[in-house]
Each structure stands twice: as structure tokens, then as C-alpha cells.
Image: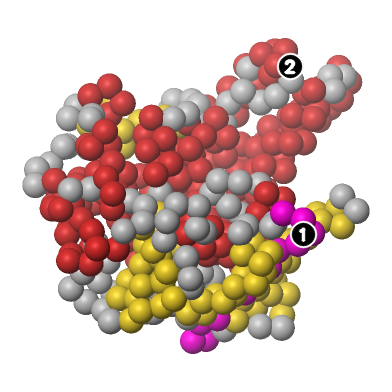
Amino acid sequence: MIDRLKLTNFRSYSDHEIEFGPDINLVVGPNASGKTNLLESLYVLAVTKSFRAKDRELIKHGQEFFRIEASSETDNYSLGYQVTDGRQEKRVSHGDAKKPLTSHVGTITVVLFEPGDLQMIWGPPEGRRRYLDLILCQTDKEYLKTLNQYRRVLRQRNSLLANFDTGRIKGEIFTWDIKLTELAAILHDRRVELLSYLSPLVNDIYAEIAGHGPEMEFVYLPSVSGDYADAFMAALASNLVTDLATGFTTIGPHREDFRISFKNNDITSIASRGEVRTSVLALRLAELSYSQQRTDKKPILLLDDVFSELDQTRRQDLVRRLEGYQTIITTTEADSILPDIKGSYQIIETKNNARTNR
């Protein structure tokens, strides 16, 4: 849980401090008043990158750095990013101690639900891979370590492919294939395990929200069939001619996907916009449960303008599920949400930085 947040040169904020309550925090203001920027800063602090922009784009116009500082009951956190003479640097500190970015991820866990999430269903595989990787990186240090190692080995293999040399290919490609296979198998197994956990839970949550079950199923789509490690190693060898022609590795976790079956059909071909939104909401709430179960601590829930497209029944169900979680909700109109909130809440107005507690 975050008690206090300070932003310096972050997006639209030059020097801004804010206090959060332990329950529901409604960030209220007109469009373009900085609501999503505030939410984004918490996301960046937790996972060290934005969900919608590059690091440079987060710096307030005319400045050369941004800094996000936050405090909780147990510690103080700081994430800073600056550009000096074209050189980029990002640092994280816990108190006075500097921390590697990889060891910081997972210290503060967040679950984000924002309008762009619908593209996780309708969009390209990259968004679905990012969804799985973000959950696993926040809840499993070994997965984050393995993913970073996989990306480094993949870059080495791709460099070898792009700068084709017959002698080097014969002498080095097999070594990189062994390393890539070992790491790819770990990523594959953890992703499949995650989807196996989420699938029945998402079904239950969807049924409770919508009043009926859609019989959803998550099916991971690997690059190869059969025993993953053995099949992947063989496929790297058989695909070498193709990889040389393209200049990059054409199979692996970096290109894999998962399919969502909805009422025994692909969700993209049958579900309405409302059903897709409810499905994504169920996914995020299931993620909340998974994160808490894996880390034994409650994530912070970030909801960016999601109530506007939910009917009263879905709003009430969502608010009921927020109990016990620190939640930051952005909205242009608090009056549409307040009747559904039964517990304590805090209103934060971005227009004049006012705060109201109840």
C-alpha cells in the first residue's frame, strides 16, 4: 500500500505531492487534467516502465529528468530517469539504498485495468504475451530473471543470423540453440501454468458479474507441439534456413500467443463489446487473486476510467470486489460511482488538488 506520492517533472506534474487512503481513492477531474498521468506514475514505480509510452515521453516538456517518490508503512521508494548528453539512466532506491531494476520489480505489485485493455482481446499477440509476462514478472523473481536471460540469448542468436557467416554459423549456432531452448522451456511451462490457474477463476468471476457463465477457456499456442524442449530444439535446427533468410529467430516464446475460447468459439468472432469488456474485467480480477496468492500481499488496483462503460450491476459487483484492496480509480464524474461505494473512500480532485475523505 502506498501512503504518499511525490512527482517531479512527470508528465503534466512539475512538483506534486498527494496522500492516498487505504481503501478506494477516486481521482476526479475533467479530461486532460492529469488523472491518468497520476495512475501511470504508480504503474511506472511498480514495474519500472509505462503501459503507454517510452521513458523519454514521461519527462515534462522542457525538463531533462523525472522522479517518482513514494512511501509506505515500511519503506520509501524512488524511481528516477534522466537524459544527459543523449545518455539515458534509470535508477531505483529503497530508502537510501540503490536497487537493481530487476530486484525492485515485485516490491510494489499493481493490477491495471484501462480502456486499452480491450486490445488484449482484439489486438495482436504482443499484448497477450505482455499480459502474461507482466503478471509473472511481478510475482516470480525467477521468471523475470529467465525472461531477461532469454532476451539476451535471443539477441545474440539474431545477431549471428543477421550477420551471416558460414564459419560462425556452424561453430556457434548450436551453442545458442541449447541455451535458448533451456530458457524457452521454462517460460513456456510457467505461462501454461498461469493460464491453467486463471481459466476456471475467470469463468467463475465472469458468471458472478454477468449472471451467467460463458464457458471461457484459455489455450496456450506454442511454437511447437509435443514435448516442448525436445520439439523446440529440433525446430530451431529445421528452421535455420528460414531464420537466415529473415535475419531473426522465427519461433519461440517471443512469438507465441494464447487463444480465448468463448461459448466454444474464438472470443474475437462471437463476443459483443460488452462481453469483451466483462471478460477483460474478469481477467484483471483473477490476476488480482493470483498475485495475492503468489506473493502473500495485496496488489494495488489501478482502474482508469472503466466505470463509464459498465452498467449498474457490473459497477456494483466490481466495487464489492474492491473491499480490502487499495484502489485508485480515475473518473470525470464521481457522482456516478459514489452510490455504489459502501465503505470508506477518498476523493482527489486533479483540477485543484483538493482531497475529501469519508
- Who comes first in sequence, dot 1 or dot 2? 1
On screen, residue 268 versus residue 187, left or right, reads left
Residue sitting nearer the eye, 53 or 254 = 53
Q: Residue at x 35, y 31 (%)?
A: 259
Q: Secondary structure at mark 2?
A: helix
Query: Which residue is tagged 2?
Result: 244
Task: Please state the horizontal and vertical placement of residue 71, each as a whole percent of the image.
Answer: 55, 81
Q: Residue at x 36, y 56 (%)?
A: 332
User: In the picture shown, does residue 354 fall above or below 212?
Assistant: below
Q: Which residues are magenta?
A: 61-74
Q: Amino acid at mark 2?
A: Leu
Task: Please state the horizontal and vertical placement of residue 206, each as a whole percent of the image.
Answer: 19, 47
Label 1 close to label 2 by CB (< 8 Å): no
Query: Which residue is tagged 1?
Result: 63
- Looking at the picture, the colour scheme in use is secondary structure
Q: Quadrant of residue 144?
A: bottom right
On screen, residue 43 versus residue 313, left or right, reads right
Q: Residue at x 28, y 41 (%)?
A: 277
Q: Amino acid at mark 1?
A: Gln
Q: Quadrant of residue 168?
A: top right
Q: Secondary structure at mark 1?
A: loop
Q: Quadrant of the C terminus?
A: bottom left
